[in-house]
Each structure stands twice: as C-alpha cells, then as structure tokens.
Amino acid sequence: MSRPSRSVVVHAAVPSDLRALQELHRALCEEERASGWGGDADPDFGGSPTGRAYLEARIGGDGLALVAGDDDVTAGFLLAGVRSGPREASAGLESMFVVPAYRRRGVGTALLARFLAWHRSTGLPFASLAVAPENHAAIALYRSSGFRGTTLVMEHRPAFPQGARG
C-alpha cells in the first residue's frame, strides 16, 4: 500500500459510499474478532439485507454516517444514532474504524470531532459509546475528547459447539 497523504477529509456519507462502508464494517468486525474483542461481530452484517438497510438509513439521515478519505482511498468511517437508555436518550457512537495505514494521523480525531458536532446539534444531553477495555488507543482518543468511563458492562458467553446457539 502506498503511503497515505496528509489530506484526509471527513464528509457525510452519500449513497455512493455504501460499498466502502460495507467493506470497512467488514474490516472492523474482522479486526474485533481477531483481537478477541467481538466474538459475535458479524463481518457479513453490512452486506446482509438488515445491515444494508441500517447503513442506508444512517446515510439517509437517520443518525449519522461519516466517511474519511483522501483522493480515492477511504481511510475510515463512523456511524452514530440516537441511543435510548434507562435515564434518557443520548447520541450514541455505534462504530468507528480507521484503516491501519491511516492510524495515528488524525483520522479518528477528525471523525470523532464531527460526531461531537453532530451530538451538539441534536440537543441530546450527552454522547455515549462502548469500547473494548483492551482497545487502549481508542480509549485514549475518547478520553482526549472528553469522554469518561461511567459504566462497566461485563458479559459471560457460554461456549456452544460450532454453529450452535442456545
């Protein structure tokens, strides 16, 4: 892969970005699975009818879909929506991914800044996200933008034979 340029631009996703979003979502899920952070992350979700409808809704303005790129290369994406909670609704960062060759170049910071601007425009009282506790780079990015840990969610997943679910 050639060295990324310095001129990465973040823009609201448009319908022609659907394929890039599907590919980046697949890469995100594959990375989460390989890291042990998302055993249930489905690399095929973005291409499924449900996943495609979800992405198209975000692109269409039901929430937020952002794409970061330079020239013809898509360097990252962010998806967000209104998240309901036990107390009140929040602006929820649902997923964000930066292609490894573009990491530590400000792409994640730029995507997150656009998300926070969208959050302010919604009038929702706060923004929220979930992150794997071992994803130290992402946690540092989120903390540098003012996020702080408020809840620890722990999961127990029984081991099922390959292909079987309880």
Image (cartoon, rainbow, N blue to C red):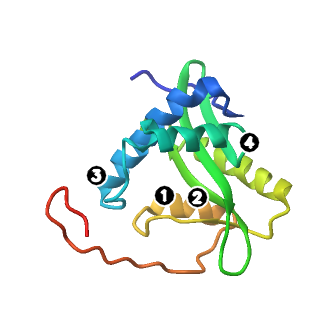
Q: Is residue 119 left or right of residue 66?
A: right
| Gap between marks 1 and 4 measured at Cα | 29 Å
| Gap between marks 1 and 3 measured at Cα | 16 Å
Q: Dot 4 corresponds to which residue? A: 61
**Residue 103 in view in this figure:** no
Give percent across and percent down for residue 11: 70, 33
* Secondary-structure class at tag 2: helix
Q: Dot 1 corresponds to which residue? A: 137
Contact check, label 1 and label 2, Cβ < 8 Å: yes
The furthest residue to the top: 72
Q: Name the mark nearer the viewer: 3 or 4.
A: 4
**Residue 111 in view in this figure:** yes
| Chain-order first, disc 1 or disc 3 | 3
Q: Quadrant of residue 161?
A: bottom left
Q: Quarter holding the C terminus?
A: bottom left
| Gap between marks 1 and 2 measured at Cα | 6 Å
Q: Name the mark nearer the viewer: 2 or 3.
A: 3
Which residue: 71% across, 51% down?
115
